[in-house]
Amino acid sequence: MHRFRIANMKCGGCAKGVTALLRQADPLAEIDIKLDTREAAVTSALDTARLEQALRDAGWQAERIAA
């Protein structure tokens, strides 16, 4: 599982955008968004660096959270 803190994910629309972006990167990903803590947990076959880069390329201030 990959976990990210996304500093500029502040509303439901943001959460939908992050979810859509992650699903675009990996359509089979399981995504759990916690808006109150601005965190996304992603179960994906893709590596953490690739997911993080996809988020950053789209303008999200994503930071890995250690497991």
Image (cartoon, rainbow, N blue to C red):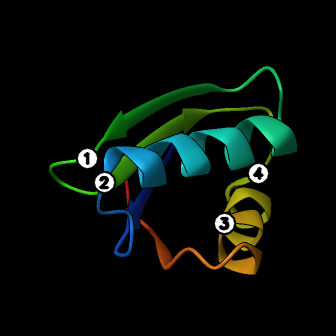
Going from N to C along the chain, the mark reached first, 1 or 3, is 1
Q: Mark 2 and mark 1 in contact (Cβ < 8 Å)?
A: yes
- On residue 55, which mark appears? 3
Percent of width and height locating residue 45:
80, 33
Amino acid type, label 3 = Leu
Question: For this view, does 55 lie left or right of residue 66?
Answer: right
Mark 2 vs mark 3, CA separation in Å: 16 Å
Q: Residue at x 26, y 47 (%)?
A: 35
Label 1, secondary structure: give it: loop
Percent of width and height locating residue 16:
52, 41
Q: Residue at x 76, y 51 (%)?
A: 47
Figure disc tally: 4
Question: For this view, does 45 lie left or right of residue 59?
Answer: right
Question: For this view, does 25 lie left or right of residue 2?
Answer: right
Amino acid type, label 2 = Cys
- On residue 47, which mark appears? 4
Mark 1 vs mark 3, CA separation in Å: 16 Å
Q: Mark 3 and mark 2 in contact (Cβ < 8 Å)?
A: no
Label 3, secondary structure: give it: helix
- On residue 52, which mark appears? none
Mark 4 vs mark 1, CA separation in Å: 23 Å
- On residue 11, which mark appears? 2
Classify 40 as above or below 8.
above
Amino acid type, label 1 = Leu
Percent of width and height locating residue 49:
72, 66
Label 4, secondary structure: give it: loop
Q: Residue at x 59, y 40 (%)?
A: 19
For label 1, the residue is 35
Percent of width and height locating residue 67:
37, 50
Q: Mark 3 and mark 1 in contact (Cβ < 8 Å)?
A: no
